[in-house]
Structure formats: C-alpha cells, structure tokens
Image: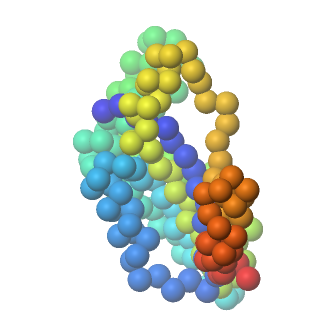
Amino acid sequence: MSIGPVQMIVLGFSHPNFHGEVIAELEKLRKSDTVRVIDALAVYKDARGDLEVEHLSNLSTEEAVELGSKIGALVGLGIDGEAGMEAGAAEGAETAATTGLHAFTDADAWDIIAEIPDDSAAALLLIEHHWAVPLRDAIARAGGYRIGDGFISPLDLVEIGLATAQEAKELHDLETAAAR
C-alpha cells in the first residue's frame, strides 16, 4: 500500500441535521479508491456546551495495520534511528490491529473543539488522496515537490474563467449558507 498525500479538513455544521449523507459520500470515494478516511473525529456540542465525540474511519483492518506500521516506523526512525524504526513499525502495527488507527487524540482536537459554538458540530477529517499517488510519484521522479496547496473559493474561479459570476455566487452561497 502506497500512502498518498494526506490532508486535514475541518468542517463546521450549524444546527446539525445529519442523515448519513456525508458518510455515504466518503464511502463512495473509498469504494472508487479516490480517498480513504484515515481518521475522522465527529464532535457535537449541545446547547449547554456538552460534547459528544465519535471517531470514524473507513480503513480496513489490514490497511490500518499497514499504515500504523509505517507511521510507527517513521516515528521510531526519528527517535532512535534504524533500531527505533523496527520497534516503531511493530508497535504501530500492533496498536492499529488492537484499537484501530486514531490519528486524532482528544488532546490533538481540543483547540479546534473549543471554538465550536454551542448547538453545532464539527468534523475533523484526515483523508488520504489515494488518487494522487501516481501523480505525486511522477512529480517526484521529475524532481518536483509540493510548495503549497489549498482550496480555491468559487468566487475566485470567475477571474480565471472556470465559472460564471452567477455559478460562483451559487456555489459560494451553498458552501457558506450554514455559517450565516
């Protein structure tokens, strides 16, 4: 398993009304081998500020073990060289097999969670862009590297001719309706 570029996305939901649509779309992307959810943290904050937290992932056990092994190896390599890499790989694989792969620990998420308004929700998604593996590898073979990345606002698409002003406004309104 080659690991593709990994991205963290934080989404907010005002007065959430979940019907499983987001999970269904992530599953479609997984089945088409487009993206994999390495870890996701869904957080709901009720009107009193009390939290409900749930971890989600769509990695198979085999994928979680392999990815856990690679992450553990990298951590171990940084701590204790080659010996640490071997120990880290074994520990990462064992942990992933036993408890799954949880990149988001409660301590990692609290800074973002504290900013969630009462009676709303947030989702922290750590996704792997599996579709990008061949492209990333071709870029590396050509001596290239990533300098930056980011999502482009629909309003910015007008300037480069990819959307009309009306289309951009509709997309922008769709993306920001819940925040208003």
| Quadrant of image for the C terminus | bottom right
* Residue 45 located left or right of residue 66: right
The residue lying furthest to the top in this view is: 82
Q: In this view, does 59 lie to the left or right of 18?
A: left
Horizontal and vertical percent position of residue 40 = 48, 58
Name the residue located 35 percent from the left edge and 70 percent from the top edge: 24
> Residue 36, image x and y in percent?
38, 50
Is residue 24 visible from the viewing direction of this image? yes
Question: Relative to residue 2, is residue 57 depicted above or below?
Answer: below
Vertical placement of 86 versus 122: above or below? above
Q: Decide if residue 80 is in sight here.
A: no
Quarter assignment of residue 161: bottom right
Query: Foreground residue, 98 or 39?
Result: 39
At which x and y percent is residue 49? Answer: 68, 81
Q: Residue at x 36, y 49 (%)?
A: 34
Q: Nearer the viewer, residue 25 or 67?
A: 25
